Amino acid sequence: MEKWIAYAFISMAFAGFTLVIAKMGLAGISGELGLTIRTLFVSLFVLGFAAFSVSMQELPAVGRMNLVWLGLSGVTTTISWIFYYKALKVGDVATVALIDKGSVVVAIVLASLLLKEVITLRMMTGAALIVAGLLVIAKKS
């Protein structure tokens, strides 16, 4: 198995834990406060991680476009997390998680349009199954 696939599966597992733990942490507080506290912890952990794993020789390689695109990614992440925590506060973890993972479909379309990545029949089938799952789980009755 290639390393990136293992990393993706590890990410998936921790993301699943994150949902349940976050829901438990929101007990008695607003989603906005919970998100703020979580983000402070994330910031500290990422800075600590960077202190040990990012070489200072890499810093000159950061260009203006890196800052622009990563900054925009930070904006979209923030907007996503705000609404994610609003949904998580009042919704079921499984339903919120599945709808959030519909972002895979959005990513496939945007990667094709903006990055010119090829969408294969396998990817289209997987995306269709994700959308079908979204419709099944999100339906209330």
Image (tube, helix red, strand yellow):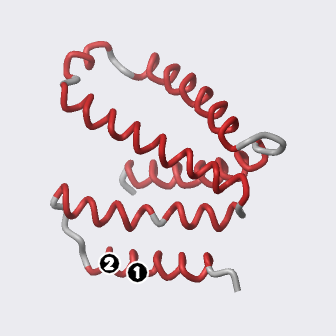
Image x and y of residue 92, in percent: 72, 64
Outermost residue toward the right in this view: 28
How far apart marks 1 and 2 lie (CA) works out to 6 Å
Q: Residue at the location (49% across, 21% down)?
A: 47
Image x and y of residue 134, in percent: 54, 75
* In the displayed structure image, the side of residue 133 where residue 35 appears, left or right: right
Which of the two residues, 133 or 50, is positioned nearer the viewer here? 133
Establish if 138 lies above or below 55. below
Image x and y of residue 76, in percent: 41, 44
Image x and y of residue 141, in percent: 70, 86
Q: Amino acid at mark 2?
A: Met
Q: Quadrant of the N terminus?
A: bottom left
Outermost residue toward the bottom in this view: 141
Q: Quadrant of residue 117?
A: bottom left
Say what secondary structure mark 1 lies in. helix
Residue position for label 2: 124
Say what secondary structure mark 2 lies in. helix
Task: Judge the density around disc 1: few (<14), some (14-19), many (≥20) Cα neighbours within 10 Å.
Answer: few
Q: Pointer 1 and pointer 2: residues touching (CB < 8 Å)?
A: yes
Residue position for label 1: 128
Q: Residue at the location (40% across, 39% down)?
A: 75
Q: Amino acid at mark 1?
A: Ala
Q: Residue at the location (18% across, 24% down)?
A: 63
Establish if 98 lies above or below 120. above
